[in-house]
Amino acid sequence: MNREKTGASGGKIPEAWIGQQVMLETTESLSSDLRAAAPVYLEDVNERGVVMLVTRHHDQSQSSRYFYPWSVVGWIRLAEEDERA
């Protein structure tokens, strides 16, 4: 069963993307840890937003979880092969 979650903009985010690298653009600058055009791991999706696992750019061995409400998510898509770390 391939259930999907619906974002605030009406877009569909498949639960199958959870655990995969995605590209995310926010409508505002939220964190210096989220590098522009860098893939992040999608950890969870729900009616309120998405949870991302972000690797810190200054220390690749550390990562942090971030919640992004749908109101600040511009777009989200699976990372292409050449974008993955």
Image (cartoon, rainbow, N blue to C red):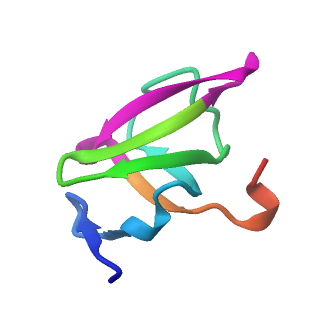
Q: Is 67 included in the stretch rendered in magenta?
A: yes
Estimate the x, y position of residue 20 in percent, counting from the top left: 57, 57
Q: Is residue 12 above or below residue 28?
A: below
Q: Nearer the viewer, residue 71 or 12?
A: 12
> Which image quarter is the N terminus in?
bottom left
Q: Is 34 included in the stretch rendered in magenta?
A: no
Q: Is residue 25 left or right of residue 84?
A: left
Q: Is residue 71 above or below residue 17?
A: above
Q: Nearer the viewer, residue 45 or 9?
A: 45
Where are the magenta residues, as a range? Answer: 55-73
Q: Quadrant of residue 5?
A: bottom left
At x 46% / y 58%, what residue is drawn? 18
At x 64% / y 38%, what residue is drawn? 36
Query: What secondary structure is the magenta-colored segment mainly?
Result: strand
Estimate the x, y position of residue 15 in percent, counting from the top left: 37, 66
Q: Is residue 47 left or right of residue 13?
A: left
Q: Quadrant of residue 55?
A: top right
* Label total for image: 0
Identify the residue at the far top of this view. 58
Estimate the x, y position of residue 52 in percent, counting from the top left: 46, 40
At x 77% / y 66%, what residue is drawn? 81
Identify the residue at the far front of this view. 1
